């Protein structure tokens, strides 16, 4: 999944973006096991990588990770009908 949002944020305490920057976000399946899905998550501008990390999502419970100060990813399980 790919998405964009406006800059004006500080990433990892050192990578400052301007409000005129378009930040590209990407989420992809980086791996997986029977009991977990590993998601790759990255944010970048045209000039630099701001963040590149992993999040482990579980099919049986809510998982949440703080990617950077004040920036979270949360995954909820979908009930099987």
Image (cartoon, grey):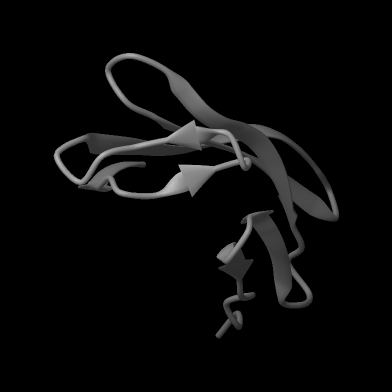
Q: Residue at x 61, y 75 (%)?
A: 76
- How many circles with numbers are drawn on the protein? 0
Q: Is residue 21 above or below residue 9?
A: above
Q: Residue at x 36, y 41 (%)?
A: 1
Could you say which quadrant of the image residue 26 lies in? top left
Say which of 40 and 20 sits in front. Answer: 20
Q: Residue at x 30, y 49 (%)?
A: 8
- The reply, left or right, for residue 16 in relation to residue 8 is right
- The reply, left or right, for residue 1 in relation to residue 32 is left
Question: x and y percent of residue 17 in the render?
Answer: 34, 37
- Image quadrant in which the C terminus is located: bottom right
List the single residue furthest toward the left: 20
Question: x and y percent of residue 35 in the render?
Answer: 85, 55
Say which of 20 and 78 sits in front. Answer: 20
Say which of 81 and 55 sits in front. Answer: 55
Question: x and y percent of residue 73 in the render?
Answer: 58, 62
Say which of 79 and 37 sits in front. Answer: 37
Question: x and y percent of residue 21 in the render?
Answer: 21, 35
Q: Residue at x 70, y 39 (%)?
A: 54
Could you say which quadrant of the image residue 70 lies in? bottom right
- The reply, left or right, for residue 6 in relation to residue 77 is left
Q: Is residue 61 above or below residue 81?
A: above
Q: Is residue 72 above or below residue 2?
A: below
């Amino acid at each position: 999944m790919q998405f964009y949002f406006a800059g004006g944020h500080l990433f990892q305490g050192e990578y400052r973006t301007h409000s005129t920057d378009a930040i590209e976000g990407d989420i992809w399946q980086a791996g997986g096991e029977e009991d977990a899905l590993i998601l790759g998550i990255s944010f970048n501008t045209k000039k630099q990588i701001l963040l590149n990390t992993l999040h482990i999502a579980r099919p049986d419970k809510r998982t949440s990770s703080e990617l950077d100060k004040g920036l979270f990813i949360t995954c909820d399980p979908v009930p099987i009908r």
